[in-house]
Amino acid sequence: MRKTIEDHNRLQARRQFLKTSGMGLGVSALASLLPQNSLAQSLSEQVPRAKHVIFLFMAGAPSQIDLFDYKPDLEKLFKKPLPESVSMGQRVTAMTKGQTQLVAPSKYKFHRKGENGTWMCELLPHLSEVADDLCIINSMHTNAINHDPAKTFICTGSEIPGKASMGAWLSYGLGSMNRDLPDFIVLTSAYWTGGTRNVQALYSRLWGSGFLPSKHQGVAFQTSGDPVLFLSNPNGIDTGVRRRMLDALGQLNRKHLAEIGDSEIQTTIAQQELAFRMQSSVPDLTDLSGESKQVMDAYGPEVQKNGSFARNCLLARRMVERGVRFIQIFHRGWDHHTILPKQLPGQCFDVDQPSAALLNDLKQRGLLDDTIVVFAGEFGRTVYGQGNLDHDDYGRDHHPRCFSAWLAGGGIKGGLTYGKTDDFSYNVVENPVAVRDLHATILHQLGIDHEKLTFPFQGLDQRLTGVETARVVKEILS
């Protein structure tokens, strides 16, 4: 036993020597002097078309049949069984397993909008007015059939929890564009109009850094009180006192860093300094008093409510102006297994006008050209009904085989509908786009080759797009 302890101590001493010698802190010190985008330069495959991403995540999975994937002939098949030649014995959830799969056509009308005649649902009148800015992908597909793994997959590139999120990858690969705000900010809707049935929790791992240094994780803004926890000074503590406390703490942390060489201590120092600067930058960011009435009205009446999707969209525009790299807005309430016609209009009310206003606002300020806006859920919904089934009352189960997403800005072609599903919106039949393809395409527009953005962990060069083949969907790029 004594020999084992001595061997362990010698190993620790050797590790400490390496960390505190030129192989350790010397390298770290040198790295701190290099440009923050030096990693991005080595990953570049082209001149980047975009600098920012705003991901509008519709948690719960919107129905593509009712919003984007127009299937007018389904009305003739109302309540008829889905042909086995279409379903092909594919996996279904436990909620509809063994049940007869009866076709439920959408009750909503679609109209052609924009110069290219994009089919748009009547529930999206404001987005219909910006149809020429949208690239609607109707051939998305994913691996997971349940919410948690599917959300984890589209946010991190893996169904297994613990991997780095897309925003964390971008922070790691591209570095910071500002010194006073985080690279990656997360906003969640505090409420939703469609109802509270089947609303799943959101876990911090969806915006976590996984195996990457923790400084790259997303910072979740709160919907009440301080936007960031502990941003305000405690009672009896003014800015000067807090600055002196931080200086003293920084000295202790740097001493500790010199002793053990743990890179996470560097992260702690940097994040504490950022938190101090955020005491002035965040209140300025969230103060909307300087916004014109015209801008506020464009986002709709809900913009006046703190924590609304509308207010979060306006905040996202302000974040882009201030150099935030990645903004992810989560809006829940889309899991419509039953009473879809009762709940879906409320969900669309929440997101339609603010999403369109965000695109217009970015465009008018010259920001849409270098900002990619993405709108997607974690999977699609079945053509067959669940729960009651009549023309005005139906629900839909989970469906990973196909779903819809739209993108705008950042070098994405507008006025385009890409990909095609069969007559039942059940299988992709033309131009399939996997989730990893979506990730690869976003990285490409930011100037990154997805195969080069890697991080060694557990014996594997980890990537956002994983180990399976991923392609850049160049057909949707301008």
Image: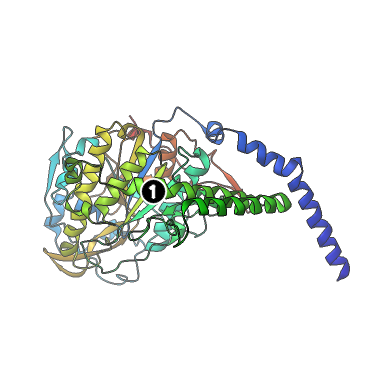
Write the residue at 36% across / 40% down: 320
Q: Is residue 209 left or right of residue 442?
A: right
Label 1 belongs to which residue?
Answer: 282
Q: Quadrant of residue 88?
A: bottom left
Spot occupied by residue 65 in the image (x, y as percentages of width and height): 22, 53
Write the residue at 16% across / 35% down: 114
Label 1 crowd bin: few (<14), some (14–19), many (20+), radius 10 Å? some
What's the coloring here? rainbow
Please determine whether, in this image, residue 312 is positioned above or below residue 193.
above
Write the residue at 36% across / 33% down: 370
Q: Quadrant of the N terminus?
A: bottom right
- What residue occupies the far top of the structure in this picture? 47
Q: Is residue 92 left or right of residue 245?
A: left
- In the image, 460 versus 267, the foreground residue is 267
Please determine whether, in this image, residue 100 is positioned above or below residue 142.
below
Q: Quadrant of residue 418?
A: top left
Q: Is residue 119 left or right of residue 427?
A: left
